[in-house]
Amino acid sequence: MSTAPDDTFPIPSRVREGSVWVDRTGRRELIGRTASGVEIPIGQGEGRVTPGELLKLALIGCAGMSSDFTISRRLGEDFPMRIYAHGVSDERTNRYETIDEQIQLDLSEVSEDEAEQLRRLIRSAIGVGCTVERTLAEPPEIGHQIDHAPASRRLATAADEAPQA
């Protein structure tokens, strides 16, 4: 399923494959959207993902995808894997000082030497193939373009939903 931004705002000419967007749905609440139709509730609280959690998910998702071929060649196509990202943002600096990845694999079918070689190969595959990690290691320039774009509608508020007397 492919999707595009709705008609609340004009679609910028720069929108193309790889573009993502968020729509504000309430105070500090957003819905992240992709052109493939994925929607991710962003914010604080139940059923929402914080931006920091999204960053960590992007990092470990990329690590998993980057290492998948390498691992499957050694453990078979049906190997189970779970990856965690650990890290809490520093309130003083408002950034993550450290994010640790923890990859869980069933290595019971390989020798200790083979397991150590696989660990090295996984680190190498992630280091070479993970765009997210490579981007975080050498941060890109980030621009902020703020456009006046008249909206076709406003968000519903609690007052809009209150019964009329």
Image (cartoon, rainbow, N blue to C red):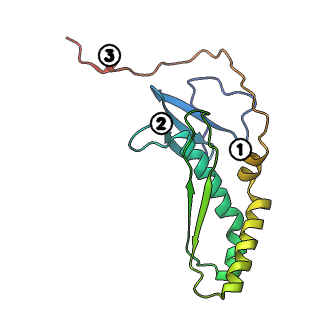
Task: Tell me the distance, in whole angstroms, between the alpha carbons under discs 2 and 1.
Answer: 22 Å
Cα distance in 3D space between marks 3 and 1: 37 Å
Q: Which residue is mark 3?
A: 159
Earlier sequence position, callout 3 versus callout 1:
1
Q: Residue at x 60, y 88 (%)?
A: 109
Instruction: Give the farthest residue toward the left.
Output: 165
In the rendered view, would you say 68 is above or below 127?
below
Q: Are marks 2 and 1 in contact (CB under 8 Å)?
A: no
Q: Crowdedness of circle 3 by 10 Å Cα count: few (<14), some, many (20+)?
A: few
Amino acid tagged 2: Gly
In the depicted structure, whether residue 63 falls above or below residue 56: below
Determine the residue positioned at 57% across, 26% down. Answer: 7
Q: Which mark is residue 52?
A: none
Element on which disc 3 rests: helix
The amino acid pointed to by label 3 is: Ala
Q: What residue does disc 2 label?
A: 43
Question: Could you tell me which secondary element the residue under label 2 belongs to?
Answer: loop
Image mark for residue 18: 1
Residue at the extreme top = 165
Q: Residue at x 61, y 46 (%)?
A: 55
Q: Nearer the viewer, residue 103 or 156?
A: 103
Q: In this rendering, is residue 159 above or below 50?
A: above
Quadrant where the C terminus sits is top left
